[in-house]
Amino acid sequence: MSGNRVASTVHAPLTYITGIGERVCAKLAKLGLHTIEDILYHLPLRYEDHRHIVSISQLRPGESALFCGRIVSSGEVGSRRGRTIYEVIIADDSGRIMLKWFHYRRDWMEKNYRSGLQVLGTGEVKQFGGRREIIHPEIEFFCGSEPPARQLAIVPVYPLTEGVSQRQMRKFCQTAAQLYSRLVVSHLPDEIAARQQLMALNEALLRVHCPPDDSDITILATNRDPARRTLIFDELFYLQLGLALRRKGVALQQGTAFAVNHVYTRPLVKMLPFQLTAAQKRVLTEIKTDMMAPRPMNRLLQGDVGSGKTIVALLAALIAIENHAQAAVVAPTEILAEQHFAQFEMWLQRLGLRAALLTGSTTTAERTQMLVALADGEIHLLVGTHAVLQDDVQFKRLGLGIIDEQHRFGVQQRNALRKKGDNPDILVMTATPIPRTLSLTVYGDLALSVIDELPAGRSPIKTRVIDNRKRPELIKFIRRELDRGRQGYAVYPLVEESDKSDLTAASAALETLRAELGGSYRLELLHGRMASREKEAIMQRFKAHDIDLLVATTVVEVGIDVPNATLMVIEHAERFGLAQLHQLRGRVGRGSAQSFCILVHSEQCGRDGRQRLQVIENSSDGFVIAEADLRQRGPGEFLGTRQAGMATFRVADILRDAHLLEQARKEAFAFIDQADIFHDAAYTELRHALMVRWGQRLELASVG
Ligand code: ADP
Ligand code: MG
C-alpha cells in the first residue's frame, strides 16, 4: 500500500515497509512494534545455519538445518487419535527422512508433493521413537540439479505473534535493516566507542538482522557477538548516563551542612537496650558524613530483614532535628507507617520531641491541626504514607526525608519528597536486599550503604518445606508451640488486592484452622481490606499476647515486630515470590527463642515449585535469595510494576549482561565527571538522544 514510499525517519510507522499493511500492523502492535525503529530493535532469538546443505543422514535431532532431497512418497495417513496427518518421505544419496504436517489442505498437498520432485527445506529435526522426522518444515520446490542459491545464508529466527509467520517477520526485519538502519545514529562519544570496541550503531543493526556469511554462528545470539554487544552497551550506557547526571545534578545543588552536636543522638544511643552492631555504626558514619556535607544526601540503605534499619533511620532523623530541622518518614502502607510511628514516637517522646502520623485515614480535623503544627515546626518528625507527599503538606524546614520503600516508590516519589524542603537530605531504605545489577539500574543515582550483619544473639530460624498432605503433623506442631506460650502467624496469599474473594479465602482459612486446632486457642484475622484502626487494634492485641495465632494475608509482610512470635506458617507457599517469603520469615526470629518457618505447598505444586521453595529452606541470606528470585521472575516482577520501567530494556538483559552494565556505568560516570553535556555544544545530539530515551523515566528535566 505505502510500500514504495521511503520514510525519512525511524519514527515513521511500519506501513512504510513493503508487505506491512494496516492488518499486519495491528498484529505487530501486539509485540509492541509500532515504528521502524521498533522493528529494527526487534532482535532475533537465535540463528540457523543455512549456509550449507546438510545431507539427510547427517540431520541431527534438536538441530535446525537446511536439507535437500527428492520426494519418494507422499500421502495422508490416519493418526491414532482419529486425526489425519500428511506424510512425505524424501531421500538423497545418504538416506531418507519423514516430513510431517498436522495442518494442511489435502488437495493442495496432493497436487504439489508429487514423487520425484526436488525440494529444499528447513526445519527442526525431531526424534520420534527410533525415527527422525521434521514437522511443518518450510519447503521450496526447485528444478534441475542446483538448489536456489539465495537460501544459503545464516538465517535469523524472530519472536513472533499470531498471524505473522517466521518468513514474513524475517522479511520485515531484514527489509527494515537494509533500508533504514542507516538512519540510526548513536552519538556515543567517540573515545568511549573506540575503547569499548563498538561498531557504528547502524552497522550493528544491519549485522544482527543480516549476519554476514562468515559470522561465528556459535556466538551470534549472545552478548559476545560484536554487533549485539554494541547494541547492548549503547542501551545501558544511556541509562547510566542519565543516572550519573541525576547523581551529579543533586550533588551540585546547595544542601544543608548539618552539625553532629549529639543533643539527641547521644541520649538515644544511651537509652537503647542494645549496642549498635558494627555494620549499623558503619552506615551511620556514611550517613553522617553525607549529612554534614554542604550538598544534599541521596543515599540508599539496604539491609536484610531484622538487620536494624529502623534505629539507623531514627538516628539520622535526630541529626536533622538537633539541627533545628524536621524529618519525614514515608512508608508504602498504612500498617507499616503506623508501626514506624509507634516506634519513633516512643523514642521521641522520651527525648521530649513530637512525632505525628499522617495517612489516608487521618481525619480532616486532625489533619488540619497537624498541618498547622507542621508548618510552625512544632512537629519534629512526620511519619506517614504517600499522604505526606500531598501538596498542602508544608514543613517549616524539612532537613531529612526517609523513604521506606519496599519497591513501591520510584524516582517521582523521591523528587516529590525532595521538593518539600530546600534540597533536604534523602535516605531511601529497602527491606528486600536487591541484587547489585538491579540496584545499579533502579537506584543507580544513589550512594549505597549496606547493613550486612544481624544483631548478635539471634538463633537462626528453622525452615521447612512441607506438602499439605502432612497437615496433621503441622497442626500438632502448631499446638505444641502455642502450648509453650509462643505466638505465630499463618499467612495466606492475597488473591487480589481489591478482590472480595481474598477476604472470603482468608476467613475460610481461619475457620478451617480453628477447627483443625481445636482447644481454646485465640485466632484472629488480619487482612488488607480492614480499616487501619481495626488492623492496628488487632496488632496491639497480638503484641499484648491476647491473640495466639494471627491468620493474615500478606499485610504482615512489612516491618511487623513481635518478639514472642516464633512460628511462621505460610500456606500455598508456591504462590509467593522468594523475596516475599524471606520477608515473611523475617517476622519471626526477633527474640532469643528458637523460631520456625514452615512453607506449606499444595499437593499440585510441581517439582520446580518445590525446588524453588528449597532456596528459602537452604539459605537465610537475603542477597542470595534476592538473586535467585530475580533470576526466576525477571526484573519486572521482582520490582513490581512501579519501577519496572527503569529496568525495561529493548536489547539488554541486566542479568545476562551484568558485566556490560558495570562497564557502561564506569564509562558513563567518568564521562559525566569531565563533560558538561548541558552546556557544551559538542554534546547537543548526545543530550537529545538521552532525553528521548530516559528523560521522562528519570525525570531528567529537573536535573539540568
Ligand atoms: P529491619 O532492618 O528489618 O527494619 P528493625 O529495625 O525492625 O529491622 O530491627 C529488628 C529488631 O532488632 C528490632 O526489634 C530492633 O529493636 C532490634 N535491633 C536493632 N538493632 C539492634 C542491635 N544492634 N542489637 C540488638 N537488637 C537490635
Ligand atoms: Mg523495618
Image: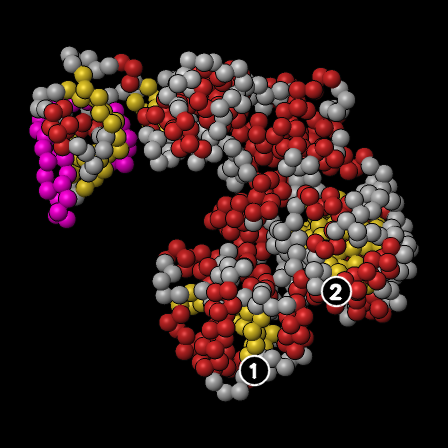
Q: Is residue 664 visible?
A: no
Given residues 29 and 537, the one toward you in this image is 29
Q: Residue at x 70, y 34 (%)?
A: 700
Element type at marker 1? loop
Q: Disc 2 or 1, which lies upstream in sequence?
A: 2
**Residue type for callout 1:** Arg
Q: Using residue 255 as the reference point, say whether residue 632 is left or right of it.
A: left
Given residues 84 and 636, the one toward you in this image is 84
Given residues 591 and 599, the one toward you in this image is 599
Alpha carbon distance from label 2 to label 1: 32 Å
Place of residue 694 in the rendered image (x, y in percent of width and height, measured from the top left): 63, 32
Examine the image and state in which quarter residue 692 appears: top right
Place of residue 685 in the rendered image (x, y in percent of width and height, measured from the top left): 66, 20
Q: Residues within 10 Å of mark 1 (few under 14, many from 20)?
A: some
215, above or below 304, in the image: above
Q: Is residue 282 magenta?
A: no
Please give the range of residues in magenta: 60-88
Image disc number at residue 522? 1
Place of residue 72 in the rendered image (x, y in percent of width and height, measured from the top left): 9, 26
Q: Nearer the viewer, mark 2 or mark 1?
A: 2
